[in-house]
Image (tube, rainbow, N blue to C red):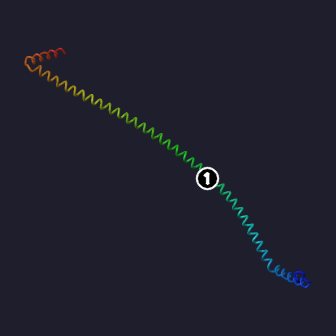
Amino acid sequence: MELVNPGLGLIFWMTLSFGILMFILGKFVWPPVLRALQERERSIEQSLGEAEKAREEMKQLVFSNEQLKREAEEERDALIRDARQIREKLIEEARVRATEEANQIIENARQKIHFEKMEAITELKNQIAHLSIEIAEKVLQKELSQPDKQLEFVKKSIAEINLN
């Protein structure tokens, strides 16, 4: 029952042992514990500062990444626009070149047709002349097959020559 109703001696010895314990703790235990707590507090503050700095750097990186992304998209759009313009220019040049070549081919074909036509006409004239000569030879042979007709033809020809 002394613990429930302590006596004066017990209180004295408890206080003395508590004081010695506090002295030992204050002399040997609390300074290292307080130093450790202060170091821990400093390291936590440093970590928080570094985390805040890292957060700011991340915001800057996100912003710069968005900016780089926008610039890359603009550059991509510009490249696509330039590629389309170049493609359209090449298509137009090819169309013009094809039209010119087609016109040249048509003109060459017309010239070739004209030359072949002229050649055919010349060949036809030559054949007509050759046929005319053959017909004339046959007619003359038939007409001049008799000697009295030959004599008459020669006289007529001499008369025409003298008149000219």
Q: Is 48 situated above or below 136? A: below
With 141 as the anchor, is 24 left or right in this view?
right
Foreground pick, 143 / 16: 16
Residue at the image position 19 percent from the left and 26 percent from the top: 131
Task: Report x, y in % for residue 6.
Answer: 90, 82
Task: Report x, y in % for residue 153.
Answer: 12, 17
Please identify the quarter of the rendering in which residue 160 is found: top left
Q: Residue furthest left?
A: 147
What is the quadrant of the N terminus in the image? bottom right
Residue at the image position 42 percent from the left and 39 percent from the top: 98
With 152 as the anchor, is 100 left or right in this view?
right
Please identify the quarter of the rendering in which residue 133 is found: top left
Q: Is 99 situated above or below 156? A: below
- Secondary structure of the residue carrying tag 1 is helix
Q: How crowded is the residue under tag 1: few (<14 C-alpha within 10 Å), some, or many (20+)? A: few
With 8 as the anchor, is 55 left or right in this view?
left
Query: What's the amino acid at mark 1?
Result: Lys
Q: Residue furthest right?
A: 8
Foreground pick, 145 / 53: 53
Task: Report x, y in % for residue 63.
Answer: 66, 54
Residue assigned mark 1: 69
